Image (cartoon, rainbow, N blue to C red):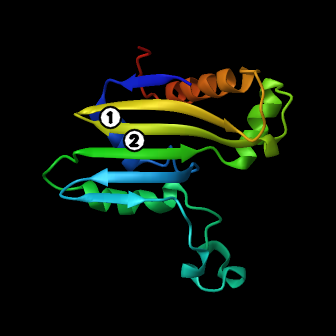
Amino acid sequence: MQSLLIPDVKDFMGKLFGSELFDAFAVSEASVSTFTSFQIDGSFHRDYYGDPAGAGEDCPAALTWKLLRPHIFELIKGKYVPLGLKLVFRLSDRNVEKLLAQAGIPLQAGDVAGLFLNILYAEGKISCTTGTSLKIFTLDKSLDRAWDEMVRRYLRQCQIPFLEP
């Protein structure tokens, strides 16, 4: 687990809400504090789209940032800055498999409950914290280190500066 501070709040928020950089992440939970608090539990109601079998492209496979981003943006836009924002992103199962293979980690994708990126905006500051959850017990921390490095590399690739406290 690592915590990274994002020094340029405006740039990060612009990329978070105004680009597709984080769209592939699943959203495990979200909360927004403006004039009231909004809580999103990350559950995805496929039946909202009608018959999922016939919905094709109209029915997403999971609750992703791409799907949720415009709705969260509607909650925070305006002349007042939100009091707080918390997003818990989860790496897709397909990308977990890729990370395990690339890093040579001897785990199966089914052993991984989730690789998480927590984004917290509070008191005018943003932090990004990584987290891993396994379905098995192991003392091996190679997945933690690989996930931490992948997040740092991704932020650099997206030209998002960060500080490691």
**Amino acid at circle 1:** Asp
- Viewed as shown, does residue 78 lie left or right of 30? left
Residue 38 in view, yes or no? yes
Q: Nearer the viewer, residue 79 or 110?
A: 110
Q: Quadrant of the N terminus?
A: top right
Would you say residue 158 is visible in this rendering?
A: no
* Residue sitting at x 57%, y 48%: 25
Q: Position of residue 110 (x, y in %)?
A: 81, 46
Image location (x, y in percent) of residue 5 = 38, 23
Nearer to us in this view, 67 or 15: 67
Residue at image x 33%, y 41%?
13
Identify the mark at residue 15; answer none if there is no mark. 2
Identify the secondary structure beneath mark 2: helix
> Compared with residue 10, is residue 61 higher up or lower down, i.e. above or below?
below
Give me the residue at 62% from left, 22% from top. Answer: 149
In this image, 134 relative to 29: left or right? right
Query: Badge 2, how many Cα within 10 Å: few under 14, some, many 20+?
Result: some
Q: Secondary structure at mark 1?
A: helix
- Measured as percent of width and height from the top left, residue 54 is found at 70, 84
- Position of residue 81 relative to residue 53, above or below, is above
In the picture shown, does residue 144 fall above or below 10? above
Q: Nearer the viewer, residue 85 or 20?
A: 85
Q: Residue furthest left?
A: 79
Q: Residue furthest top?
A: 165
Identify residue type, mark 2: Lys
Please count the marks in the image.
2
The reply to whether dot 1 and dot 2 touch (C-beta < 8 Å) is: yes
Position of the C terminus, as image quadrant, is top left
Write down the residue under mark 1.
11
